[in-house]
Amino acid sequence: MKIIKTFALGLTVAAASQMTFAADSGFDLKTVDPEADRIALQNYFKARFPESEISDYVNGIYAVDAGSREQWEELEEFPPYEFDVEKGEELFNTPFANGKGYADCFENGGIGIRHKFPYWSKEEGTVKTLEQEINECREDNGEKPLKWGKGEIAQVSAYMAWTSRDKVFDVQIPADDKRALAAYLDGKKFFYAKRGQLNLSCANCHVQGTNIRIRADLPSPQLGHVSHFPVFRSKWGALGTLHRRYSGCHKDSRSKPLKPQTETFRNLEYFQTYMSNGLIANGPGARK
Amino acid sequence: MKKGLVIAAALALAPTFVAAESFQEAFEMNRAMYGNDHVFDWNGGKYHTNHEEELEARVQATKTNAEDLLAKANAKNKEVAELGFEWKLTGGILKDAQAAIDEGDYQKALDLAAQAKYHARIGIDQYHYAQKNWHLSVPQ
Amino acid sequence: MRKLTTSLCAAGLMAMFTTAPAVADNHADQIALGKAVYMGKSRGNCISCHAIDDPDANLAGNQGPPTVAMKTRYPDKRKLRAQIWDATKNNPLTIMPPLGKHWILSEEEIDAVVEYIYQF
């Protein structure tokens, strides 16, 4: 009986994998279709939480859980990130030793451009993130780069996000550079692959496990994940960047976590932000 | 008996499934049900449920043996790190094993090195599994 | 341990009386270990996903089914052990970590958890 069961299971798995490969669903460079992925993800969450508006997913778990939403709305009445936005504005407008400033490094003087990140750079052949360019701006002007996770980099990023609120994400994957699609696929693969001693994928908690309690915590939906970063997290008692959160999440699977701004994490951000195309930038945000 | 039938059925249905239950499957099922140091039958032979690393730790608890196994464990962990699938606690276990050697507790060092080596080996398996199966959880 | 018990039994009736509580204590110790593993964040942390009707359990999660009617659900205790050892065997996508296969818990800790939850 045991043997029959094992055999049957093996056969089912084999049949299933043959089917999925045949179904042309975008698991390799030939078939990957970001727009189909984005729509499939929206449909998944529509089916799971029919009451929630897609546009509300920028508010994370509070888009799908009425209970915690109330507490969060109270929190947002006196936003805990307010000080950081002010500090970020001050830092943003303080000239470097050479007299130049952040405004000189970015399009439109760095105002209202958060939603254009990350983007694919054909010249450099890699995904560029906002925090990465903040530090490049500093180094190009003879300043020391900032630490990636928290503090000043998060504050500058928060101010830039603040000036971009309500702008719509529209991440592009240029068709004339196959490497861009490869970066997207790499991010997608990272998101769905099980890893670490606990054998968890990002999707385990943030797709199938969304809004189901892990102890007292409710994992957020992956749709809208990036929109509100940098984030003031009550658990941190401070503002932090998206890649700080990535490192923490990665560690939660009991993997040795990658460092912020490594290629894999930038690819993950590229994939995740593409998933949020059509949603608005609403950073900085506040989360439990 | 039944097993023969199943194998015949497997051959008829899917020629790629030669055996209904591979050794790996039999090993894992028995380890899962009975833990270590259990003896089970498979294809007419007797086998035990110990991991290869657990057997590697069952040598004389000497400094040389502990250092040998620790070196193997370090190498294995490097291998899994290169694949991007190193586990969080393995580095610490390897350090603890070295500390045990320094303190002269060679059995402890052997046991820790065995665990770290096992973690690294399973991490490598996990990487290969992920390459083939990551797509299964993508919403369609 | 079993050998030890047998020899003590053979030694005489008095010895048997004194041994019986010792065996019970062993089982109680095992259940206490199982409970510590079930509740402990850096151990099994089963409580993070599985509610259990133990007065000491608080803020249980619900990613997995509650730990109830274990004897009915798993008449064969070995099958329950196997499920804890590697839940991906039956469901490759499960969020439940393979506690034995990934050597998150020791085999003794898994045995202890089985004994603890088999009471519920």
Image: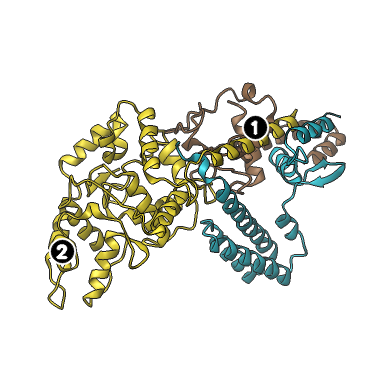
Please give the chain letter of the residue carrying mark 1: C
Q: Residue furthest front?
A: A176
Residue behind mark 2: A92
**Residue A256 vs residue C30, the one in the foreground:** A256
Find chain A in the image and tell me its colour. yellow
* Horizontal relation, residue A192 to residue B115: left or right: left
Residue behind mark 1: C80
Near mark 1 (Cα within 10 A), the count class, few <14, some 14-19 or many ≥20, is many
**Residue A133 vs residue A251, the one in the foreground:** A133
Quadrant in which the C terminus of chain A appears: top left
Residue in the picture at 55% in, 60% down: B83
- Depth check, mark 1 against mark 2: the one in front is 2
Residue in the picture at 45% in, 33% down: C60
Mark 1, secondary structure of its residue:
helix
Residue B64: where, in percent of width, then height?
Answer: 72, 72
Residue B67, placed above or below residue A273? below
Q: Are marks 1 and 2 on the same chain?
A: no
Mark 2, secondary structure of its residue:
helix
Residue B134, placed above or below residue A210? below
Looking at the rendered structure, the kind of residue marked 1 is: Leu
| Chain displayed in brown | C
Looking at the rendered structure, the kind of residue marked 2 is: Phe
* Horizontal relation, residue A168 to residue C3: left or right: left
Find chain B in the image and tell me its colour. cyan
